[in-house]
């Protein structure tokens, strides 16, 4: 998988300045690297206690290659929280999920899964993900009248996570017994907090806390946030919609991620906690962790 090594090294300089380079060495040595062999994933989505339909969409894809030629695990995770009323919301989120995944299948996942050569001169991963989100944005804008959606995507390749994000769904990293929010909400109240006009406590109860200033499907001028995370040996990555984090605070999120025996148990407990808190919105979560390491 020389294209994977080339792409990671290219991304080090083009899209994640300041991040340490990954030295994978020749392909025949990859089996001896200390890398996780598989990703263990939990996933759950629930309509909640108030709404009569679910506008959230969640997609998860995981791939591992074991044996003497073992390579880094790959995971692709997409969470979209649609808006725009009945049918428009769920159509917007489903359209965005399908288009962004199709673009990644072409550019990253298909070459990875079928060992196809990939030209190292091609775009770095963050640029590929931005282009995929922009394609999803155009599809939703053209096809779903009055609809829009958040879109939070995570691509895990070995010990790195590459994220693209629009809206107020969130990605968190739980590691070393600490929960950290990776993404930044594109909401009016979060912007007011950044400007120092309201406090985070006030934001949690602000009447306009659900108003977004950036969403997929809202027009051509879309800015996509990207992030690169170096993943530690042990971690849990959480992607969730505001139906979860809006009703379950960070301390509760951290406690579940700390104590749950498996990612699936974590997801189930998080959904239950949000429903116990009123379940006033759709609730969706995916939790990813590494499993098994080679020496």
Image: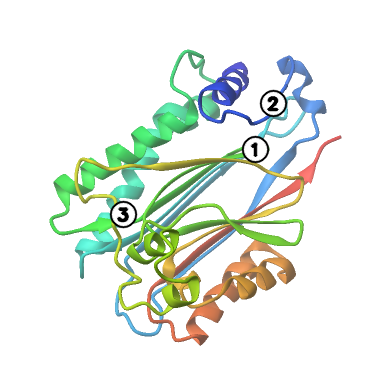
Nearer to us: label 3 or label 2: 2
Q: Which mark is residue 22?
A: 2
Residue at disc 3, secondary structure: helix
Q: How is the image coloured?
A: rainbow
Mark 1 vs mark 2, CA separation in Å = 15 Å
From what the image shows, is residue 41 above or below residue 271?
above
User: Which quarter of the rendered picture does the C terminus lie within?
Assistant: top right
Residue at image mark 1:
73
Nearer to us: label 1 or label 2: 2
From what the image shows, is residue 179 above or below residue 100?
below
From what the image shows, is residue 30 above or below residue 216?
above
In percent of the image, x 78 and y 46: which residue is there?
292
Label 1 vs 2, first from the N-terminus: 2
For the residue pair 67 and 254, the one nearer the viewer reads as 254
Q: Which mark is residue 94?
A: 3
Label 3 vs 1, first from the N-terminus: 1
Indicate the position of residue 242 as horizontal and vertical percent values: 43, 68
In percent of the image, x 54 and y 76: which residue is there?
248
Please rate how many residues cluster around mark 1, counting C-alpha atoms within 10 Å: few if below 14, some from 14 to 19, many from 20: many
Label 3 vs 2, first from the N-terminus: 2
Mark 3 vs mark 1, CA separation in Å = 26 Å
Cβ atoms at labels 1 and 2 below 8 Å apart: no
- Mark yes or no: residue 199 visible: yes
Residue 29 lies left or right of residue 21; in this view the side is: right
Mark 3 vs mark 2, CA separation in Å = 35 Å
Residue at disc 2, secondary structure: loop
Q: How many marks?
A: 3
Please rate how many residues cluster around mark 3, counting C-alpha atoms within 10 Å: few if below 14, some from 14 to 19, many from 20: many
For the residue pair 17 and 122, the one nearer the viewer reads as 17
In percent of the image, x 57 and y 28: which residue is there?
17
Residue 110 lies left or right of residue 191; in this view the side is: right
Indicate the position of residue 175 as horizontal and vertical percent values: 72, 55
């Amino acid at each position: 998988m020389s294209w994977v090594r080339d792409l990671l090294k290219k991304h080090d300089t083009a899209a994640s300045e300041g991040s340490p380079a990954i030295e994978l060495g020749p392909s025949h040595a990859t089996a001896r690297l200390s890398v996780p062999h598989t990703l263990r994933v939990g996933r759950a989505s629930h309509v909640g206690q108030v709404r009569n339909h679910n506008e959230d969409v969640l997609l998860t894809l995981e791939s591992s290659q074991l044996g003497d030629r073992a390579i880094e695990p790959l995971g692709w995770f997409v969470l979209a929280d649609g808006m725009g009323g009945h049918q428009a919301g769920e159509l917007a989120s489903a359209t965005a999920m399908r288009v962004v995944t199709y673009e990644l299948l072409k550019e990253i996942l298909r070459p990875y899964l079928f060992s196809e050569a990939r030209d190292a001169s091609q775009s770095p991963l963050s640029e590929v993900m931005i282009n995929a989100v922009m394609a999803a944005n155009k599809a939703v804008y053209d096809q779903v009248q009055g609809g829009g959606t958040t879109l939070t995507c995570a691509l895990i390749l070995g010990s790195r996570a590459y994220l693209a994000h629009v809206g107020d769904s969130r990605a968190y990293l739980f590691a070393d017994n600490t929960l950290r929010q990776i993404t930044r909400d594109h909401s009016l109240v979060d912007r007011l907090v950044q400007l120092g006009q309201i406090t985070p406590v006030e934001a949690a109860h602000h009447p306009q806390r659900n108003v977004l200033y950036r969403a997929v499907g809202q027009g051509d001028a879309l800015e996509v946030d990207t992030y690169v995370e170096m993943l530690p040996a042990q971690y849990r990555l959480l992607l969730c919609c505001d139906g979860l984090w809006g009703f379950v605070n960070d301390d509760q999120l951290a406690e579940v991620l700390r104590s749950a025996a498996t990612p699936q148990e974590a997801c189930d407990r998080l959904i239950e906690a949000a429903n116990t808190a009123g379940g006033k919105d759709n609730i969706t979560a995916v939790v990813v962790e590494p499993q098994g390491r080679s020496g």
